[in-house]
Image: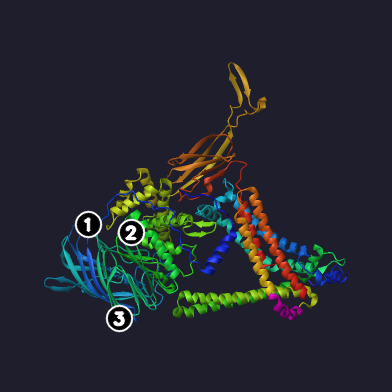
């Protein structure tokens, strides 16, 4: 249901609200949810744990002077494919920041724009010293034979390591590692800024082996994220004792020795591990349901921490109801300092990073949005561990839809901005921002293949969200909640593909809707409804000369006959559907006497002429008056006025006039 | 503009200096009218094309411009996207209007001060044409004051911003982002106080330049004396002006806008606020005129 009640126009309320909130820093907490969360109708049981494929036992000692992590540890990996494998692929993603020959930093790399994400002070790298396979006869260091790059490419973020013998299906191997990770100056998802160190992609990480024995490996691209197998992490972190540590998983041991803080974290059923240390963090802990939430933020950010916690108080039960209960005991939220903002807005299992300046006004819900977005990734990435490189719409896209849906349910139509009469919904921004990009590339494109970062962001995030928001508005909340809930439950702790996703959706939507969805995601699908013509006239018998019973009779005004006294009117409205997507829509007719008539159209044909009968002349016709097809390319052509009718702009004009007069009275003469 | 004609008409007694006791906003309705007319004319020039553009966007909508303010802002965003090309020149127009106001505003300012300071020889209020003549005669010197004031305010604002940025940068690592930002805001507030003092001083000097006839530079000397007495009145009219805006907002919030008479009532209240603010400003200028 879309709330379309008009609101008051009072332009100065905007000014007063901004000024008051900004000046006073009022910390208005978002209102509680307006209604109970939609409970997904999917009854699919939740998988309690994933197949255990790879276990990491790691130790990380941070040299604060050089921002280098000295690491050692063990990987136990099991071949879960159906074939024997004779190599492993290791992601060394810190090498993306080693030099400008990497896929990430090389000039002209897609998504890098003008190189704004290049490390500004120092480079980063990961140097593996030892990568030894344990064998009955002793360890064999495989690293000397490792291929760090391909013959035709100098990128060193994706290494191939040949095994001395094939590893049979279901056989496990153990690898001992020693390595050094030099953090770059903060760059997107990882790095350091003064004493702040964020360690993401900091250890040699095995790529995922698909069931057919193919390694899903890829270099670190600017637009690409990650893909890995589930397993158990046991990580001991050693930093300066003044620092506070935040990490994936549960802290199982903590001590201070010789001026060093040593903490051990464990987490099962996850596919990555990140951690952060900073000597200026202020920690805030809260139990939300079964989850122990810890927020780490700079001093003076307490009011933002409260906003982030309020968001999670809503999000944890809401996402739990829709997509299944959050399965972990802990969630760590890191709010980076402003100078390290590039590490904000990122997700790792049980650890997310947010962001935003301390003076973000409460009416601008960017803090809530980034928090709920990154939390949503615990589902669409964490639990539904799709290949983020190959199918980014499955994680970022569906997560953006879930974000918009949750924020709308929580904060209403002002889910992005709620400033007096100006109520901006996330869904509106998502939909409007994609109108040009939709013709550039399909949404379902792999991250590395997008031509620009703008296309990637617009299509993967916003377009996917807008497409599913259209489904929600057109076919109802319950259906999309059931479909996504079913998908989230069936593929929890698995690695779903688009085929899996569509298979689930096919159980909830009719084939024509599935076809539309496929076109929208894979074929640059678009739609534009428009009213091209209208007609309205009194109902009366036809004028002219008629031969009746052997006599010619003239009927009409020129024959001296007046229009019949009846007030009955009739007419038609011509509606067209341009583009490749079809949705059912409503055409709302408004008549002179203010009465309205809604006519449904299935929207399958390219156009239709809808006839009507009424007691008053037609004044206006509007197709999709509530904006349910939010991805409509142009709403201005959705409306038509019959001759002699004009909608009024006097209220907005008067408000603008008054605002400008006031501005002049402030500045002069 | 120091043409002999204006000297002659003034010296021939077209208007004379008004006695001190009769210098007030209440007795100078024409001064208020000058101010209101000027603000209205400029606002009309800017808003009229915007209103036409708006009407073309919402003309086919039963509820008219109410669609733009529907919660969610889908239709507002859609209209902005489709009218962006048409809207851009309107921003230029608005900026141009503000520029015109800054320069040509010296003319109505001169007319307002003349309406306060002078009257017809027979004691009647200064006629519009006589006020216009007086304003035209003083236009050059008033414009000069405005330009000097503009650059002084610009320099003060830039210095304040630069000082705030430097303070923020140097303090961030030791005090944290929030505390250093607050410190920087404090510096900016100080800068705003300096700017407001300059704005007030501009009014004083401008009135002096308009009243003191050819020896307008004496205004500088007298400004220093006047300034020490005027700041309370200036801040008072500033604060009351703000209060009037808030009051107008409160009054209009509860009027049903969709009703025809509701719209009329809102428009009337808005204009009442504008006129009341004009009275305040004229009253402030009258106080200055009394001092010269």
**Could you say which quadrant of the image residue A169 lies in?**
bottom left
Q: Earlier in the sequence, mark 1 or mark 3?
A: 1
**For the point 71% across and 80% down, which residue is it?**
B224
Q: Which mark is residue A260?
A: 3
Q: Which residue is mark 2?
A: A379
Furthest-bottom residue in this view: A258
Label 1 with label 3: CB-CB less than 8 Å: no
Instruction: Name the mark nearer the viewer: 1 or 3.
Output: 3
- Dot 1 falls on a residue whose secondary structure is loop
Q: Which residues are magenta?
A: B218-231
Q: Main secondary structure of the magenta part?
A: helix
Q: Residue furthest left?
A: A137
Label 1 lies in what chain?
A: A
C-alpha separation, residue under disc 1 versus residue under disc 2: 25 Å
The quarter in which the C terminus of chain A is drawn is bottom right
Residue occupied by mark 1: A212
Vertical position of residue A435 compared to residue A361: above or below: above
- Residue A612 lies in magenta, yes or no? no
Furthest residue in direction top, as rendered: A550
- In percent of the image, x 18 and y 58: which residue is there? A83
């Amino acid at each position: 249901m879309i709330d379309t009640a008009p609101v008051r126009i009072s332009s100065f309320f905007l000014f007063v609200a901004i000024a008051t909130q900004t000046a006073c820093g009022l910390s208005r907490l978002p209102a509680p949810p307006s209604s109970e969360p939609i409970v997904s109708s999917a009854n699919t049981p939740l998988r309690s744990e994933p197949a255990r494929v790879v276990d990491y036992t790691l130790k990380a000692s941070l040299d604060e002077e050089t921002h280098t992590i000295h690491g050692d540890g063990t990987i136990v990996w099991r071949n879960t494919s159906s074939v024997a494998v004779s190599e492993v692929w290791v992601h060394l993603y810190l090498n993306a920041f080693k030099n400008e020959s990497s896929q990430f930093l090389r000039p002209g790399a897609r998504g890098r724009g003008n190189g704004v994400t290049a490390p500004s002070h120092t480079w980063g790298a990961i140097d593996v010293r030892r990568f030894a396979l344990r064998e009955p006869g002793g360890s064999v260091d495989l690293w000397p034979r490792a291929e760090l790059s391909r013959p035709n490419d100098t990128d060193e973020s994706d290494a191939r390591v040949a095994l001395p013998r094939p590893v049979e299906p279901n056989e496990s191997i153990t690898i001992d590692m020693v390595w050094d990770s030099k953090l770059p100056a903060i760059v997107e998802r990882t790095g350091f800024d003064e004493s702040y160190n964020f360690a993401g992609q900091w250890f040699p990480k095995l790529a995922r082996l698909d069931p057919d024995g193919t390694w899903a490996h890829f270099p670190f691209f600017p637009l690409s994220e990650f893909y890995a197998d589930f397993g158990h992490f046991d990580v001991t972190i050693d930093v300066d004792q003044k620092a506070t540590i935040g990490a994936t998983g549960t802290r199982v041991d903590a001590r201070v020795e010789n001026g060093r803080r040593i903490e051990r974290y464990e987490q099962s059923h996850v596919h990555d591990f990140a951690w952060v240390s900073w000597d200026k963090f202020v920690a805030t802990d809260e139990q939300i349901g079964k989850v122990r939430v810890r927020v780490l933020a700079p001093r003076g950010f307490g009011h933002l921490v409260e906003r982030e916690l309020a968001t999670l108080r809503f999000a944890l039960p809401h996402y739990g109801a829709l997509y299944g209960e959050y399965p972990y005991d802990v969630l760590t939220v890191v709010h980076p300092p402003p100078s390290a903002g590039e590490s904000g807005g990122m997700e790792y299992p049980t650890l997310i990073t947010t962001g935003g300046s301390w003076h973000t006004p409460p009416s601008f819900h960017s803090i809530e949005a980034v928090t709920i977005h990154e939390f949503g990734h615990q589902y669409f990435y964490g639990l539904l561990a799709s290949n983020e490189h190959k199918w980014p719409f499955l994680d970022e896209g569906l997560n953006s839809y879930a974000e918009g849906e949750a924020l709308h349910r929580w904060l209403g139509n002002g889910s992005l901005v709620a400033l007096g009469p100006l109520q901006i919904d996330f869904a509106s921004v998502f939909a409007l921002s994609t109108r040009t990009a939709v013709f550039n590339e399909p949404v379902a494109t792999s991250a590395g293949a997008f031509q620009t970062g703008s296309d990637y962001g617009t299509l993967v995030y916003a377009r996917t969200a807008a497409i599913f928001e259209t489904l929600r508005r057109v076919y109802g909340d319950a259906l999309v909640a059931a479909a996504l809930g079913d998908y989230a439950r069936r593929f929890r702790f698995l690695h779903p593909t688009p085929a899996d996703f569509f298979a689930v959706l096919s159980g909830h939507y009719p084939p024509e809707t599935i076809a539309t969805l496929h076109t929208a995601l894979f074929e640059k699908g678009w739609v534009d409804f428009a009213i091209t013509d209208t007609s309205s006239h009194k109902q009366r018998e036809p004028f002219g000369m008629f031969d009746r019973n052997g006599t010619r009779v003239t009927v009409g005004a020129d024959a001296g006959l007046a229009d019949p006294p009846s007030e009955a009117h009739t007419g038609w409205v011509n509606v067209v559907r341009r583009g490749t997507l079809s949705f059912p829509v409503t055409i709302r007719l408004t008549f002179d006497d203010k009465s309205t008539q809604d006519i449904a159209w299935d929207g399958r044909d390219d156009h239709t002429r809808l006839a009507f009968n009424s007691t008053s002349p037609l004044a206006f016709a509007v197709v999709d008056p509530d904006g349910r097809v939010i991805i409509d390319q142009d709403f201005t052509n959705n409306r038509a006025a019959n001759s002699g009718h004009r909608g009024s702009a006097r209220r907005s004009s008067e408000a603008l006039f008054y605002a400008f007069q006031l501005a002049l009275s402030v500045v002069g003469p | 503009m120091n043409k002999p004609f204006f000297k002659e008409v003034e010296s021939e007694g077209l208007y004379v200096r008004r006695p001190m006791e009769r210098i007030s906003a209440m007795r100078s309705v024409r001064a208020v009218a000058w101010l209101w007319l000027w603000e209205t004319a400029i606002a009309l020039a800017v808003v009229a094309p915007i209103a036409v553009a708006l009407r073309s966007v919402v003309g086919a909508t039963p509820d008219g411009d109410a669609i733009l303010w529907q919660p969610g802002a889908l239709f507002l965003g859609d209209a902005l996207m489709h009218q962006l090309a048409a809207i851009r020149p309107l921003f230029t127009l608005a900026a141009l209007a503000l520029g015109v106001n800054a320069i040509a505003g010296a003319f109505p300012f001169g007319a307002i001060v003349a309406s306060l300071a002078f009257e017809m020889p027979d004691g009647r209020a200064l006629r519009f044409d006589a006020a216009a003549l007086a304003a035209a005669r003083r236009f050059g010197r008033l414009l000069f004051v405005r330009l000097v004031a503009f650059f002084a305010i610009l320099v003060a604002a830039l210095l304040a911003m630069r000082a705030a940025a430097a303070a923020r940068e140097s303090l961030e690592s030791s005090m944290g982002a929030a505390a250093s930002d607050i410190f920087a805001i404090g510096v900016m507030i100080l800068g705003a106080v300096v700017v407001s003092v300059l704005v007030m001083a501009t009014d004083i000097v401008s009135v002096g330049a308009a009243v003191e006839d050819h020896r307008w530079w004496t205004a500088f000397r007298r400004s220093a004396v006047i300034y020490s007495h005027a700041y309370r009145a200036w801040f008072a009219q500033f604060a009351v002006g703000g209060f009037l805006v808030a009051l107008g907002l409160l009054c209009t919030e509860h009027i049903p806008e969709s009703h025809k008479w509701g719209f009329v009532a809102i428009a009337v209240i808005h204009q009442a606020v504008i006129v009341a603010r004009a009275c305040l400003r004229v009253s402030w200028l009258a106080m200055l005129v009394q001092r010269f």
